[in-house]
Amino acid sequence: MNLRTLSEAARLLGIQSHRIVYAHHIGAVPEPERVCGRRAYAGDDINRLAQHFKIEQVGKEEHVSVQVFDANPGR
């Protein structure tokens, strides 16, 4: 299992880490497991965060499908 730190999860999601901490604090998303007292995010945890923050694309290594839009429709 590939676990990531809070800062790694935030970087993958493209958000600041304090937003993730706040989401845990208010109970919007469950806390991940802790390893040596620090949050350790598995793929499922990161996917839950992406859903909460309505993020469509997660870092390349997460293999999330991305919709591509034509920049010049009608041409």
Image: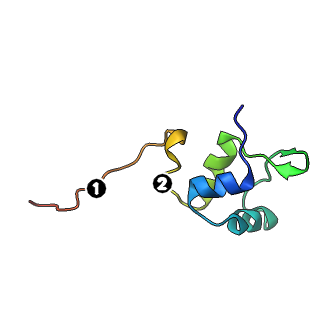
Front residue of 26 and 71: 71
Picture coordinates of residue 18 (x, y %)?
Answer: 72, 68
* Residue at the disc numbered 1: 69
- The count of marks equals 2
Q: Residue furthest toward the right?
A: 37
In contact (CB < 8 Å): disc 1 and disc 2:
no
Q: Residue at x 81, y 66 (%)?
A: 25
Residue at 8%, 59% in the rendered image: 75
In this view, the residue in front, 24 or 40, is 40
Q: Position of residue 59 (x, y in %)?
A: 53, 48
Is residue 27 placed above or below 34 in the rendered structure? Answer: below
Residue 53: name its quadrant: bottom right
Q: What residue type is labelled 2?
A: Glu
- The residue at the point 69 percent across, 64 percent down is 17
Element under label 2? Answer: loop
Give me the disc on residue 56.
Answer: 2
The crowding category of the residue bearing disc 1, from other C-alpha atoms within 10 Å (few below 14, some 14 to 19, many at least 20), is few
From the viewer's perspective, tell me whether residue 26 is left or right of residue 56: right
Callout 1 secondary element: loop
Percent from the top left, x then y, of residue 61?
Answer: 53, 40
**Coordinates of residue 40 in the picture (x, y in percent):** 78, 46
Q: Which residue is drawn at 52% across and 50% down?
A: 58
Q: Residue furthest left?
A: 75
Alpha carbon distance from label 1 to label 2: 13 Å
Which amino acid does the dot numbered 1 rest on? Phe
Q: Say which label, 1 or 2, has the lower sequence index.
A: 2
